[in-house]
């Protein structure tokens, strides 16, 4: 239930973003939208899906008409649940928009506090540590035909350990790190129970307390890491955050620092895990591509990474809030409407990617054209780290593994969300190269 060819006869009548069929097999629906109505109004909502590549890109660049201040776009809980949620939230710090869910100039100020950690020089410094992580995990893979869930064995720990390295999180906290990450995305693009929503909120508060303690420790004992730089960062002040000194700048407050760290935590592992898992599946299903990777692991891994990103697009789309009555491709969209710029649909637009449902790492211009990391000022700040992790995994698999075989009983079930898409598990067996 993953490919366009597997889908039954489709119709957009009664389309529901939360239906299992849509969440498990969205590509056929998006292809139909691109052909029939590339700006699709979801029935019974104020949500409009934009699915064509040539329409998505201008929206991402027009920050005045299409705002990223979408932190409250979810379904509103009932009053009783809101009261219970507020009781949990009061135990931590208020959530504030920083990078992903805020517009310029505020976005630019916050992004600048961590941008230096994702420049080429920093990525070069991380190559060795990440290769060590990947090799250690590949060493632990069974290679005697035993089936293993590659999500748990390889694709979760690689990005978790990598971002933990960046944030200076000790090994004994990695399990908590993963749990907090899961809690942070629990309600994104999916319907969850009230109990799970409260449990996830409690996990986020636990995350806040741990990192607040770490940040306060860096304030008195800086150690030259990202969190030390956050507590020492200075940004332009605003009326609601006046400058303390005469230079017109101020320090970040604790809710802002926690927001930034939480976004790095989620962006730093959930999406990469989902792309890595889809990549392993695609390599197992395409022996010709696997052979090319094995023949030139160093040179061909970046091609594989970019095509896997295009095919998987783990962040399926992103919200934008319409700031004025406008038209998109002649389709009227009112002020206040919620747009979803559907990256996954744009990444399979045949006008840009011929035969878009084929796994072809030899496509020209992939890195510049695909939208897996977005486009414009909100281009994913962690993209260089994600690419480094994926390149390293695919390169080392090509060097050290002879074959990857999918287990016959794989269900290929995807995370139940229209925003975050990735296989929940993938059972495979490996044989080791000589």
Image: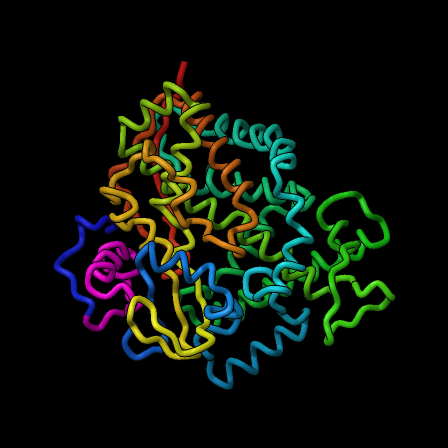
* Residue 93 on image: x %, y %: 68, 69
* Residue 407 on image: x %, y %: 29, 36
Residue at image point 26% right, 54% down = 27
Residue 416 visible here: no
* Residue 19 on image: x %, y %: 28, 66
Which quadrant: the C terminus? top left
Q: Which residues are magenta?
A: 13-40
Which residue sits furthest top? 434
Q: In the drawing, does residue 99 fall left or right of residue 220? A: left
* Residue 42 on image: x %, y %: 30, 72
Q: In the drawing, does residue 173 fall left or right of residue 319? A: right
Q: In the drawing, does residue 14 fall left or right of residue 186? A: left
Q: How is the image coloured?
A: rainbow
For the residue pair 7 and 200, the one nearer the viewer reads as: 7
User: Which of the 4 quarters of the picture holds residue 395?
Assistant: top left
Q: In the image, is residue 432 above or below residue 356?
A: above
User: Which of the 4 quarters of the picture holds residue 406?
Assistant: top left
Residue at image point 69% right, 44% down = 168
Residue at image point 29% right, 35% down = 360
Find out whether residue 17 is within the magenta segment. yes
Q: In the drawing, does residue 167 fall left or right of residue 323? A: right
Q: In the image, is residue 46 above or below residue 8?
A: below
Find out whether residue 389 is within the magenta segment. no
For the residue pair 250 and 368, the one nearer the viewer reads as: 368
Which residue sits furthest left? 9
Residue 360 visible here: yes
For the residue pair 254 and 195, the one nearer the viewer reads as: 254
């Amino acid at each position: 239930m993953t490919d366009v060819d597997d889908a039954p006869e489709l119709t957009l009548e009664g389309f529901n973003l939360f239906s299992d069929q849509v969440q498990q097999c969205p590509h056929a629906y998006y292809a139909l939208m691109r052909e029939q109505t590339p700006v699709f109004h979801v029935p019974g909502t104020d949500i409009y899906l934009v699915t064509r590549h040539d329409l998505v890109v201008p929206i991402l660049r027009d920050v005045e008409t299409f705002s990223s201040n979408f932190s409250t776009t979810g379904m509103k809980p009932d009053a009783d649940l809101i009261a219970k949620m507020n009781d949990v939230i009061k135990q931590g710090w208020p959530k504030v928009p920083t990078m992903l869910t805020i517009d310029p100039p505020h976005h630019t100020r916050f992004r600048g506090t961590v941008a230096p950690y994702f420049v080429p020089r920093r990525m070069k410094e991380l190559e060795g540590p990440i290769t060590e992580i990947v090799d250690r995990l590949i060493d632990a893979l069974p290679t005697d035909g035993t089936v293993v869930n590659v999500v748990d064995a390889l694709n979760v720990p690689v990005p978790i350990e990598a971002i933990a390295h960046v944030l200076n999180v000790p090994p004994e906290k990695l399990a908590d790190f993963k749990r907090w990450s899961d809690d942070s995305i629990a309600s994104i693009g999916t319907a969850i129970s009230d109990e799970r929503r409260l449990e996830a909120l409690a996990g986020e508060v636990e995350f806040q307390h741990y990192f607040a303690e770490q940040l306060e420790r860096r304030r008195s004992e800086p150690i030259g890491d990202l969190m030390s730089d956050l507590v020492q960062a200075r940004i332009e002040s605003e009326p609601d955050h006046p400058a303390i000194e005469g230079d017109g700048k101020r320090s970040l407050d604790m809710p802002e620092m926690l927001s930034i760290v939480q976004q790095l935590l989620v962006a730093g592992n959930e999406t990469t895990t989902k792309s890595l898992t889809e990549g392993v599946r695609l390599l197992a299903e395409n022996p010709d591509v696997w052979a090319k990777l094995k023949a030139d692991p160093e040179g061909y891994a970046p091609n594989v990474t970019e095509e896997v990103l295009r095919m998987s697009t783990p962040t399926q789309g992103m919200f934008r809030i319409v700031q004025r009555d406008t038209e998109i491709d002649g389709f009227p969209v009112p002020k206040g409407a919620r747009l979803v710029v559907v990256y996954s649909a744009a990444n399979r637009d045949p006008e840009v990617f011929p035969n878009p449902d084929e796994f072809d790492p030899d496509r020209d211009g992939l890195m510049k054209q695909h939208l897996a990391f977005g486009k414009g000022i909100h281009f994913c700040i962690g993209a260089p780290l994600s690419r480094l992790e994926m390149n390293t995994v695919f390169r080392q698999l090509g060097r050290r593994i002879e074959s990857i075989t999918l287990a016959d009983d794989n269900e290929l079930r995807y995370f139940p969300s229209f925003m975050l898409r990735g296989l929940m598990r993938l059972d495979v067996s490996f044989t080791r190269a000589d």
